[in-house]
Image: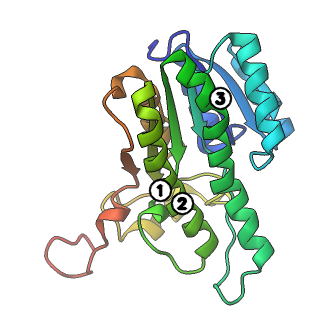
Amino acid sequence: MNRLLNKVAIVTGGARGMGAHTCRLFVQEGARVVITDVLEAEGEALARELGDAARFRKLDVSDESAWASLVAETVEDFGRVDVLVNNAAVLAFGSITELSKAAFERVVAINLVGTFLGIRTVAPFMKQQGAGSIVNISSVDGLRGVNALAAYVSSKWGVRGLTKAAALELGHHGVRVNSIHPGGVNTVMSNPTGAPVDEVNKGYRNVPAQRVGDPDEVARATLFLASDEASYCHGSELAVDGGMAAGSYYPGLPGSPI
């Protein structure tokens, strides 16, 4: 408890899924949280659930002026911004030859440009404070290639590289920038039909954990990087992926459970 006591955090894509779990955990650990999302009903409901420690603000992360207004309001109301979690993201399925330019650009605008705008907007305030933590939610697909997800993969590799550049530019000002790389996580994005977890797990027999991830497992990793416990982490990549990035089993050979 109290690992984020008196800290002020902004979480994008915070209305549901990994973002909502992160907001709940941050409040439990003593933070005041600004929940941002385009999903107003879900975001407002979560803010009511969390009480006085949380507020909801609608934010399109690809909107430069909206970012400026959000951060200025946060600093005016709370006096500081200690943590930024760039979590908002979208998917677009389709082969490279079938994916439209507009669909590709939308994914990059939200996943990568949105992360860039968040970093750029909070950085001056964190530099002035001499402290801050920025946690960028990339993906296991920012560590590897995947068919049918060219736009998503490109954006998440971009987040990974942006994290390194930002860590170099901001680290000597006391601002830490790190990335988290979730694997399959049981959220609306990856399980839109709400299939039972036992059914979902059947698709993960080829990875070491033998199951899909829980959003709270990603939230706890985010908490670590956001907290002062990660004081020597700059530009790091934390894979919370059940071993997906490590490789996959050859069925029937020694060491394989399948």
- Give the side of residue 238 with respect to residue 162, left or right: left
Residue 225 placement, left or right of 47? left
SS of the residue at dot 2?
A: helix
Label annotation for residue 158:
2
Q: Which residue is mark 3?
A: 10
Dot placed on the residue nearer the N-terminal end, 1 or 3:
3
Q: How many marks?
A: 3
Residue indicated by mark 1: 161
Of the numbered discs 3 and 2, the one sitting upstream in the chain is 3
Residue 51 is left or right of residue 158, and the answer is right
| Residue plotted at (54% across, 24% down) | 127
What's the distance in space between the residues labelled 1 and 3, CA to CA?
A: 22 Å
Q: Position of residue 15 (x, y in %)?
A: 72, 38
Locate the C terminus by quadrant.
Answer: bottom left
Point out residue 130 in the picture as x, y percentages from the top left corner. Answer: 48, 18
Q: Amino acid at mark 1?
A: Gly
Residue 193: tell me if it is visible.
no
Determine whether the residue tagged by mark 3 lies in a helix, strand or loop.
strand
Q: Are marks 1 and 2 in contact (CB under 8 Å)?
A: yes
